[in-house]
Image (tube, coloured by chain):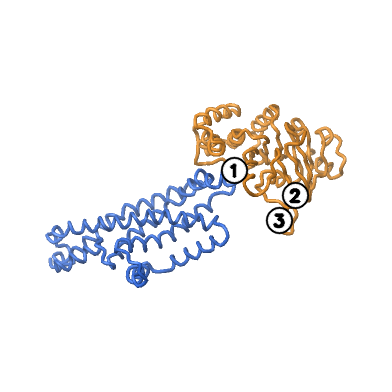
Amino acid sequence: MSPLIQITNLKKAYGIFTVLHGIDLDIAEGEVVCVIGPSGSGKSTLIRCINRLEAFSSDSSIVVDGVTVGPGKALAKVRAEVGMVFQSFNLFPHLTVLKNVMLAPMRVRGNKPEDAERKARELLSRVGIAEQAEKYPGKLSGGQQQRVAIARALAMEPKVMLFDEPTSSLDPEMVGEVLDVMKRLAGTGVTMIVVTHEMGFARQVADRVIFMDGGRIIEQGTPGEIFDNPKEERTRGFLRAVLNH
Amino acid sequence: MNLLNTFFNIPILIETFPLLLSGLLVTLEIGVTSIAAGLAGGLFLALVRLYGAGPIPFFAKIYIDIFRSIPLLVLLIVVYYALPFVGIRFSPFVSAVVALTLVSSAYTAEIFRAGIEAIPHGQFEASQALGLSGRHMMIDVILPQAIKIVIPPLTNNCINVLKDTALASVVAMPDLLKQATQAQALSANPTPLIGAALIYVALLWPLVTIVARLEKRFGGEKRP
């Protein structure tokens, strides 16, 4: 079976500064992949290229579910199939929580308002926010906002969910509630790519852990391989720095 | 007593008041039409300046710069007195509305642009990541937030347009100012002019205080 996401020779540069040095990566349907690494290693840029929030070099290729990611008409199709959760939530502050979740299914999928609302309420109860549906995002805590953002992305029934450091801007006591939602999501067979600093989450939930540094994939493997028996010195150095303090 | 009879002559004011009110109606017609057309034109200009293809943003910027530089009175006289020489003949009403709209849309464009640029980049990214088209991103996400931010400066601009309608009297438009000067000539007394001034103030003072209140309200609010 061909992989759900096929990344070939992914290169990205800002002027003379190269962020990604030709990444090759395949991701299978249903796989949960955690990307770890120091800041500036290119891990956020990598997943932001998958839905082309970042443009990339023209000799690189990313194929999502058979559709090539590039400028033009096909991009809207790819973006509809790829959900994304941001570090800073990026909820729409002028819309209620419910309307935040309903918007894209109505506008992009053409769902009827009553269908979109039914699905939105169902998703909001799945992430434990059902009773906040009529509130505006500004009235919610960071953890609640991020759970709404997850529901908003899921409302499009995406084939893959990208998480860009989803807990990095949360107060410590709210990290757990977001990770719990993500763990349950991983259990439902959704394909997930998670850029994270939460090593506990990666060890517990990931099928595969990818360690990136300097715009390259240094090492990848099962959580056991990466966390208990890393082969590369740079991986060992990074894990020593983040785990022992 | 003499001063009172000269500037605040009540019988003359009562006599000329219907004329002044008919002038006010014309002023409001010119003002409201120009404000509406200026808002539409300004939004269009702001969008093509920000997102137009190829050289379009450049031309939008040139337009905006020119019409923010030209004095409205000069433009009005050009539209009304110069264009007929090339066969373009507008009525006084259309001339006034055209001149006011051309200038107002240039100012409004800059206001809308500032509002759109004040929206955090994450709002654009979240819209794109959800697969929203550029049009839906603007209509459903960006503009509702941007317009809320720019309501105070937009209202300010509306006040300026309403005040500038007085220039239409130059092209023989029977607006409030023109009717007042007419009435002054007929009655040989400046009271109608004072009356017109008071009507302008009565019309615009509430708007001015609304702007102040809006600025306080939106200025104090934390932006997302």
Q: Secondary structure at mark 3?
A: strand
Q: Residue A237 in the image: state x and y as whole percent.
A: 83, 43
Q: Chain of mark 2?
A: A
The type of residue carrying mark 1 is Ala
Q: Residue at x 41, y 69 (%)?
A: B70
Answer with the quarter of the image where residue B41 lies: bottom left
Looking at the rendered structure, whether the residues under marks 1 and 3 are on a common chain is answered as no
Q: Earlier in the sequence, mark 2 or mark 3?
A: 3
Disc 1: host chain: B
Q: Residue furthest front?
A: B87
Give the quarter of the image for residue A233: top right
Which chain can be seen in orange? Answer: A
Q: Is residue A245 visible?
A: no
Task: Please name whichever residue, B42 or B86, is drawn nearer the observer in this view of the structure.
Answer: B86
- Crowd tier of the residue under label 2, counting other residues whose Cα lies within 10 Å: few below 14, some 14–19, many 20 or above: some
A97 to B4, vertically: above or below: above
Q: CA distance from mark 1 to mark 3?
A: 22 Å
**A197 lies left or right of B2:** right
> Residue B180: x percent and y percent?
21, 63
Please state which of residues B106 and B5 is positioned toward the viewer in this rendering: B106
Amino acid type at image mark 3:
Tyr
Q: Which labelled disc corresponds to residue A60?
A: 2
> How far from the left and from the top, in percent, is residue A5?
73, 39
